[in-house]
Structure formats: C-alpha cells, structure tokens
Image (cartoon, grey):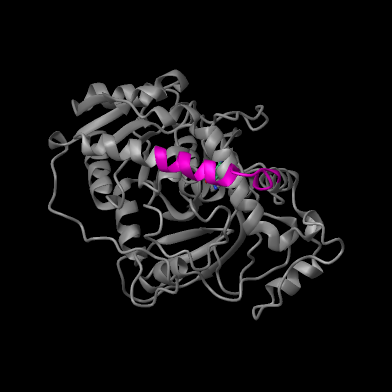
C-alpha cells in the first residue's frame, strides 16, 4: 500500500501503471546493481508483451529485447515490468490506452501525464528506482512534471532506438525517468551505445567535459513562452532561490511550435503506422504488411488493423491528408530548420542552456477536457532534437508535488552531459 500526497492509501494496481509484471534479473555486477527498472510498453523486452497500449497488438510478444533493455540488464539492473502509456505514444495524459488510464500516484483523481505515464507513476509511487520511456514531443518530461519526478530526454539519436516502436522517427528518443537528475545521469551512462549497438543510425556523444560551476552558466528564458505560463511557481522559486544568471531571449518560432509539431508528427505517423493501417490506405481487407521474419506482420494481419484506437486513427488520417497536400511536408521541415536555427543563435549568443517551465499547470483531473497547447513547452526541444530535462524543483510546495510544475532545462545539440551536470547542481540547491 502506498500513500498519496493527501495521505490516502493507494494500491499499486489501482494506478494502472503496469500492464505486465515480471522479473528479469540482470548481470551480477554493474553500475545499476540493485536498481529496479520499469519499461514502457513500446520498448521490446524479449518474451514479454509489446502492445504499445493498443488493442491491435493484444497478445503480441517481443521476439527480442531493445538495446536499452539489454544495456540495463548488462549493468546489473532488474527489469520488473512493462508500463502503461498512450497508444503508440500519442497523447499527454495516458488516457488513450487499451489498458485504461494511468492515475497519478500523488492524487489518484489526476492524470499521471503521458505518454510515458506508467513509467512516471511507477517511479513516483516508489515502485521502481527508474523507468524507461520514450519522448517524441514531451512524453517523459510532461509525466515527470505531473508526477513530481525527473524526466530526461537525451539528444535525438544518441541512444539506440533498436527495439523502440516508431511514432515519429525524426523526434523519437528513448527517455529516462527517475527521482533525481543524479539517477538520470547514472542510467544515461549505462544506456549509451557500446560495441553491441544494433542501431546503425545512433550518433556518437563526446564524453563529459570538465565540471562547470552553475554560477558560470547563463540561462536563457524565452520571451515567447511567457503568454503560455499559467502556473510557474516552481520556476519562480528556482530563479529567486538560486541566483543563477538569467537572460531574456527571443525564439520566435516557439509561438507556433505546438501547431507545427502536430502536423510534423502526424505526417510521420501516417508513414510509420502504415504497417498497421491497410484499411486506411485503400488496400481494403488486405493490410499492407510485408512478410517478415519475426512474425510481426502475421500478427498484425491476424489481429485486425481496425482495432486501432480513435486518437491513432485521427492522427494517421490527418497525416495522410497533409501528406497529400503539395509542399506540406517540405514546409514543415523548413519550419523545423528555422526553429533549430533560432535555438542555435541563442546558444551562439552566449546562453549555455534555455530555462522554462515543463508544463502549463499541475496534473489535470483525469476527466479534464483536452488542451491542444498542453505540450507547448516540451515540443520545441523535440522538434530541434535538443537534450532537455524536467526537474521537480518546486516539490516542497505546501500542496505537494501534484500541485506544482516541473522546471525544464534545454541544451545545445549533444550537450547532454553539460545539461545533466547543471541539473544535478540545481537540484542539489533544493535538497
Ligand atoms: N503529447 C505529445 C503527442 O501526443 C507527445 C507524445 C510523445 O512524446 N510520445 O504527440
């Protein structure tokens, strides 16, 4: 039995954080010896379900383990289950799930966030030391903010995606959830691709540089985020309590980032999910699924593509219509490049990191109406491929963690170690 922030007893099962429990024991020795790790259900663990919270994949079991799962096992962690999520990663509240909605461990009337809500809830409830998730537009950072834990989205491409089910490949990364940035850093190091990496598109990351003092860094706070901020008490506490050097900066493309993201990922999803959606591509009763060695195609054929949930169908459909419009994809790519260039200018002009809130508000009620701007602070780093972390720095607020918003740091391309180092120092000031 767990206690939520109001002192109410909660059974772990009631959170619907896990869709499968089991134990895979890792190596005897390693940096993660003694750790328990939960794995989002869009990351393959050999012999365990891989449903992506979709009825379309009910009963499907992964024929191999993802590189990141092999890595945590190789470093001595125990993998203890698969976690609930929004179907194929599409959502911000872990409600679009064939397994039911995930509840926030701090207040079970509220959402845990999404799409990696199950991993965040499992960490927040103290059921595991860490969680693996995925982040395409904020899916580890937003649930981290809502559940009062740390959520780290590495630079695009630096962790192997072998065994991660695609949603929007230009943004998809494996993400990390833990109680602190210090734990995220230990886990990140264990996950970095080694000689066994099976993702030929993984990018190399330089080793950590010399330690940099927090007071030597300059943080840029984008002006364009100001109109969206509703509840930035945690960020205010950071700015007032730490005396870090802050500068107001301009990144004009941030104003439209949420709308750009919606188009950009729907177009990619229409392509990556085509393997499940023969019915929408006009192929009638014969899904366009190629024969493949691991039996995945046969599984999809057998299990009716039409069992995809309404949010997935909506996005794939929207993406197909956009892709059929001449110039739409090229236009979105150009706008993403513009956003990248604006971030680059801010970093070139002397800002080491960008600072802002992670979310617009604390965890909403489970049945709150959807908000198209919910991800407005998290999607920019995803579009630009930049590393970003959400920290629960306002966690001592009187209303408890569920009552505050995470603080987000965003770094230049592949500055993951600098970002983690700054995050660790920042959280140290709040402990
Ligand atoms: N909420 C965003 C979406 O629905 C981000 C999800 C994610 O990062 N997987 O696309």
Ligand 1 lies in quarter: top right
Q: Is residue 429 left or right of residue 379?
A: left
- Against 240, is 180 above or below? below
Instruction: Count all numbered tags in the image, as a single digit.
Output: 0
Estimate the x, y position of residue 250 in percent, counting from the top left: 33, 26
Estimate the x, y position of residue 179 in percent, counting from the top left: 38, 46
Say which quarter of the image contains residue 45: bottom right
Quarter of the image with the C terminus is: top left
Nearest to the observer: residue 332 or residue 66:
332
Say which quarter of the image contains residue 216: top left
Magenta residues, start to end:
321-338
Estimate the x, y position of residue 110 in percent, counting from the top left: 59, 32
Q: Is residue 276 left or right of residue 48?
A: right
Q: Which residue, as the protein is rendered here, is positioned at the far bottom?
A: 293
Nearest to the observer: residue 197 or residue 260:
260
Nearest to the observer: residue 409 or residue 145:
409
User: Magenta stretch containing residue 277, yes or no?
Assistant: no
Q: Is residue 1 visible?
A: no
Q: Which residue, as the protein is rendered here, is positioned at the far front?
A: 326
**At 35% across and 63% down in the image, what residue appears?**
203
Q: Which residue, as the protein is rendered here, is positioned at the far right?
A: 285
- Against 162, is 12 above or below? above
- Against 237, is 425 above or below? below
The main secondary structure of the magenta stretch is helix
Say which quarter of the image contains residue 14: top right
Estimate the x, y position of residue 176 in percent, counting from the top left: 42, 53
**At 21% across and 61% down in the image, what residue appears?**
207
Q: Is residue 198 visible?
A: yes
Q: Is residue 418 left or right of residue 113?
A: left
- Against 263, is 122 above or below? below
**At 17% across and 37% down in the image, what residue appears?**
214
């Amino acid at each position: 039995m767990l206690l939520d922030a109001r002192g109410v007893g909660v059974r772990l099962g009631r959170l619907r954080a896990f869709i499968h429990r089991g134990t895979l024991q890792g190596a005897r020795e390693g940096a993660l010896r003694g750790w328990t790790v939960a794995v989002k259900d869009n990351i393959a663990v050999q012999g365990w379900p891989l449903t992506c919270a979709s009825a379309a994949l009910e009963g499907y079991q992964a024929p191999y383990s993802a590189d990141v799962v092999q890595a945590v096992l190789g470093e001595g962690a125990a993998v203890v289950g698969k976690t609930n999520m929004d179907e194929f990663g599409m959502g911000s509240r872990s409600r679009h799930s064939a397994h039911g909605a995930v509840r926030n461990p701090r207040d079970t009337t509220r959402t845990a966030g999404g799409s990696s809500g199950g991993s965040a809830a499992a960490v927040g409830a103290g059921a595991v030391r860490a969680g693996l998730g995925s982040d395409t537009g904020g899916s580890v950072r937003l649930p981290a903010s809502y559940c009062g834990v740390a959520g780290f989205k590495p630079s695009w491409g630096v962790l192997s995606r072998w065994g991660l089910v695609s949603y929007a490949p230009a943004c998809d990364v494996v993400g990390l959830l833990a109680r602190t940035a210090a734990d995220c850093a230990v886990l990140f190091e264990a996950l970095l691709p080694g000689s066994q990496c099976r993702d030929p598109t993984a990018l190399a990351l330089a080793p950590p540089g010399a330690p940099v003092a927090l007071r030597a860094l300059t943080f840029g706070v984008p002006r364009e985020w100001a109109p969206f901020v509703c509840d930035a008490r945690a960020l205010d506490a950071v700015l007032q309590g730490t005396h870090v050097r802050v500068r107001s900066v301009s990144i004009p493309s941030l104003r439209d980032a949420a709308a750009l993201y919606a188009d950009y990922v729907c177009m990619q999803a229409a392509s990556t999910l085509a393997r499940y959606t023969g019915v929408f591509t006009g192929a009638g009763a014969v899904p366009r699924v190629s024969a493949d060695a691991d039996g995945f195609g046969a599984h999809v054929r057998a299990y009716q593509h039409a069992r995809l949930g309404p949010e997935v169908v909506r996005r794939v459909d929207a993406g197909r219509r956009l892709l059929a419009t001449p110039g739409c994809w090229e236009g979105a790519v150009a706008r993403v490049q513009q956003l990248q260039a604006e971030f680059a200018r801010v970093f070139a002009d002397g800002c080491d990191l960008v600072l802002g809130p992670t979310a617009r508000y604390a965890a909403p009620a489970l049945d709150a109406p959807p908000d198209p701007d919910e991800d407005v602070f998290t999607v920019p780093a995803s579009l630009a491929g930049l590393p970003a972390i959400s920290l629960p720095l306002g966690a001592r607020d009187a209303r408890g963690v569920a009552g505050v918003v995470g603080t987000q740091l965003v770094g230049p391309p592949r500055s993951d170690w600098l970002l983690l180092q700054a995050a660790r120092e920042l959280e140290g000031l709040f402990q």
